[in-house]
Image (cartoon, coloured by chain):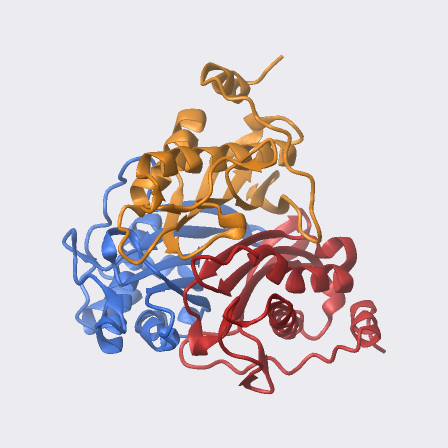
Chain colours: A red, B orange, C blue
């Protein structure tokens, strides 16, 4: 039987891909145990920066504000968050109902010196976090511009989550 | 009665603004409980990247090294840390004496390829951390250049703190 | 008697430098206690961004893809990880066998808008993490391009580790 968060994903028409297999010397995520409540285990999940891959291929390449529109950038940031959730699901042993909090998202927007709408682009990821996880999806966030990203991705998003 | 840190802020002539209200889907900070000492609660406070807003308006826009001087950049980094402290105070339920450590600051300096004085700029935030919190203010730090920041801010600073 | 990790470093011909002394208001690392296993202490070590200094001097300056080759960039990323290990050793009180996990590496590659091989450059750090720490060296990773870094460094790497 699907859990609460899986039901929400289904209602949004989102199917999580399998998380990309570990490549080279790094992995999709790591889990650090904390003691979120004394006497009950908790953990931080630290997830690698995700680019907007769909079935292993970059959905769109280029720079936001120069070839990639803000609206397209938002859709790409949303894809990054879907890929974060795919990793997160693996970290939860398949049960996304274990997610207690989206602690932090870091957003990297490939853009030139004159670009100013980084926050709007990153909302594509942030809004989906709250659509899926409700109040538990409200996160601390840092968004910055970058000249270039791996594979010419226009957006990259990393995340830290609390599970328990 | 004001606490030790509030007294220090007053001596420095710093009045903390109210923390910016949550906008859109992200929030100013999140708190992750750890067990800093077994048997005694502790927590990590993860705070969103802060730009040099004063009363909701950017104090200065542009790039450091091209329109914004290093000295101006330092003052802006200091303002970012004041905004971090405003968020931190809210995370502490108003009592900054609960701060055990400034764990990490991340500094983002909007600058061109030829700029090299990122560390000097970021000292504006780092020096204030130690002025206010003493040895507990000594932090790990990562400082990088970026082509652009939200709203054309010249500096952005994010932070992780330990409270208990 | 040297530990397991020290023996591995010796086999790789790596001699860790003394960690750079704290400069200004920031420090090389901070340690946050968690309770990695209830009843047994654990801690997160948060280490400042490291540039490829050798004996206090930058091994090479410039931008990757424009003056600095990808291969040189890899060697510089490897140097950054050596400097991270020097800090980590100090955080462990000298005993690197206390390292439980390389939790996360953040890689910053100074490069222009057209550069796409950030991941290859960062492998210089990631591969060494696994050479030295084995499975415990497999880490979450975020790699981005930046226009400039402190002191015109071509690469900067920050890290989070778990010790216990």
Image height of C155 relative to B77, above or below: below
To which quarter of the image does residue B83 belong?
top right
- In the picture, measured across the screen, residue A79 lies left or right of residue C124, that is right
At 23% from the left and 75% from the top, the residue drawn is: C69
- Where residue A72 sits, quadrant-wise, is bottom right
Q: Please say if A151 is above or below B135.
A: below
Between C157 and A162, the residue placed more toward the observer is: C157
Is residue A46 something one can see in this rendering?
Answer: no
Residue drawn at (42%, 69%) of the image: A148
| Quarter of the image that includes the N terminus of chain B | top right
User: Taking B35 as reference, is C11 left or right?
Assistant: left
Q: How many marks?
A: 0
Residue at the (65%, 53%) spot, across then down = A139
Q: Nearer the viewer, residue A84 or C38?
A: A84
Q: Foreground residue, A19 or B28?
A: B28
Residue at image location 77% in from the left, 53% down from the top:
A135
* Percent position of residue A103, x then y: 62, 54
Q: Position of residue C116 (x, y in %)?
A: 38, 77
Residue B10 in view here: yes
Q: Position of residue C36 (x, y in %)?
A: 54, 55
Q: Quadrant of the C terminus of chain B?
A: top right
């Amino acid at each position: 039987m699907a859990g609460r968060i899986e039901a929400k994903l289904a209602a949004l028409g989102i199917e999580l891909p399998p998380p990309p297999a570990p490549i080279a010397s790094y992995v999709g995520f790591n889990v650090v145990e904390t003691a979120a409540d004394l006497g009950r285990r908790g953990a931080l999940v630290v997830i690698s920066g995700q680019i907007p891959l769909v079935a292993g291929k970059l959905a769109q390449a280029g720079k936001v504000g120069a070839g990639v529109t803000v609206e397209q950038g938002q859709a790409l940031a949303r894809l990054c968050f879907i890929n974060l959730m795919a990793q997160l699901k693996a970290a939860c042993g398949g049960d996304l109902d274990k997610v207690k909090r989206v602690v932090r998202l870091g957003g990297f927007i490939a853009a030139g010196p004159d670009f100013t709408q980084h926050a709007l682009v990153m909302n594509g990821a942030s809004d989906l976090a709250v659509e899926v996880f409700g109040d538990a999806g409200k996160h601390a966030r840092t968004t910055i511009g970058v000249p270039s990203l791996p594979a010419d991705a226009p957006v990259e998003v990393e995340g830290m989550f609390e599970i328990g």
